[in-house]
Image: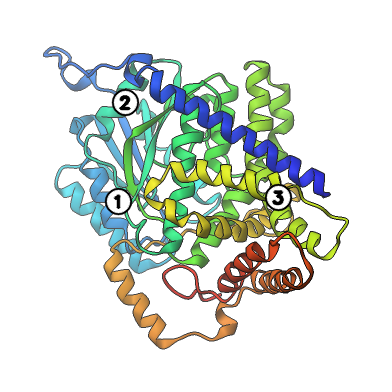
Amino acid sequence: MGRLSATKIVLESLTEKVYMSSVVGFNYLFGRKTEKRYKWEEFKNDVESGNSVYPLVLIQIPMFNEREVYQLSIGAACGLSWPSDRIVIQVLDDSTDPVIKDMVEVECHKWAGKGTNIHYQVRDNRKGYKAGALKEGLKHGYANECEYVVIFDADFQPESDFLWKTIPFLHHNSEIGLVQARWKFANSDECLMTRMQEMSLNYHFKVEQEFGSSTHAFFGFNGTAGVWRMAALNEAGGWKDRTTVEDMDLAVRASLKGWKFLYLGLIKVKNELPSVFKAYRFQQHRWSCGPANLFRKMIYEIMMNKKVALWKKLHVIYSFFFVRKIVAHIGTFVLYCVVIPASVWIPEVEVPIWATVYIPTVITILNAVATPRSFYLVVFWVVFENVMALHRTKATFIGLFETQRVNEWVVTEKHGDASKAKSAITHQRRLGLKLSDRLLMLEFCMGIILFISGCYDLAYGKYYYYIYLYLQAIAFVVTGLGYVGTHIPNS
């Protein structure tokens, strides 16, 4: 990829970010409230009909060896305020640890003893991972009777009024197939890495999701903290396990069937960010590889679809998939970790100042606005995102070309009680780990290359690139040595 191609890619990404932010800002200042744009009214009790006026709702909680958080998630789901005979809770336990399975089952029986309509479901295999578990759960007769299905990952803890705030939008607007709530991070202050994640995810929710919802364009289901209309889910073909982003797959197929999605940013569901770098890398691999692989599998289907408008198909293909899920990762890495260092060694390679200063500044400000409390951390965010761009670029190519690890699924490690986790982490640090157990060679080598390039620029350069190169080199080396997150990863 040449210099012009890399800068063009980054410029396209900037243009989209500015456009989305402008639309969201305009709607925030002058747009109508969601309750006015869509029909929303509370359910009214009817003496003759009784609780039948309330739709039957299924709550699905997929789990896999969730020792630290299973009680929190089950308790939060069982604490949802809704007529008790109109809600069904389904715990889908794929745990391989028999001790944890017994603990989850006992917890379900405890709530069942209190009168909660809760079902503990297990499978004899993990085929399809989360998608397979959700699909299997919908095969039960009691699930098919439900009009709506709500999904909460094992670390998500909704407020008790979650259903009262979300279900009416679906019930009174027949064209809406999905209502997506926002995530609220319980451990965002745990370490610098969680603060960086908070900045990126806040931008995703406040800008990308809000833009897609307010303009009736496509935006992806986040896999949790969302309510699906069962009819929309079934018409789209249900859950499929062909990629590791089953949530995005379902959302694209439902959108192609003409269903609309609604994002409710004021409804926040508490959850946990990965605080261990090893867990974060696995998560980012899945989040980068999966969309690229889904793009490969669905581009023809999207192009041939006749049920949605041409502009919406172009938005899904170009804006959602190509720019955000492929170009953003590759362009960032190539420009800031390949082209700029190359320009130090090869005088013929010149990078315009707008690509090295102006564009990064605007992009950084747009992301930081979504999390004003972390504005002073923007330099750390930039260099950390560039480090992750290497990992995401590799995962993107794996997804596009369906090479090894394309279907790799590693469940994100969760700690639950942060204080208990920090106690265990302190003990692990005290024991120490071998360098070979925590070294990430690709990141470490990249850091060395950037450091050498910085030294060369300091001696012979004229554009002061060494300032950036030294900062970026430090970020790569620190990451490569495993000193990121709340503890040293095992690999």
- What residue would you read off at disc 1? 73
Q: Give the percent coordinates (x, y) of residue 214.
A: 47, 23
Point out the residue furthest to the right here: 348
- What residue would you read off at disc 2? 167
User: Label 2 sits on what residue type?
Assistant: Ile
User: Viewed as shown, does residue 389 lie left or right of 239?
Assistant: right
Quadrant in the picture for the C terminus: bottom right
Of circles 2 and 3, which is in front? 3
Splitting the image into 4 quarters, where does residue 176 fall? top left
User: Label 3 sits on what residue type?
Assistant: Ile
User: Viewed as shown, does residue 138 lie left or right of 477?
Assistant: left
Q: Give the percent coordinates (x, y) of residue 59.
A: 33, 39
Secondary structure state at the residue bearing disc 1: helix
Residue 201 numbered mark, or none? none
Secondary structure state at the residue bearing disc 2: helix
Residue plotted at (46% across, 54% down): 197
- What residue would you read off at disc 3? 330
What is the count of numbered marks?
3
Q: Gap in Å between the C-alphas at discs 2 and 3?
A: 39 Å
Residue plotted at (43% across, 63% down): 192
Q: Gap in Å between the C-alphas at discs 3 and 1?
A: 36 Å
Residue plotted at (81% across, 44% down): 4
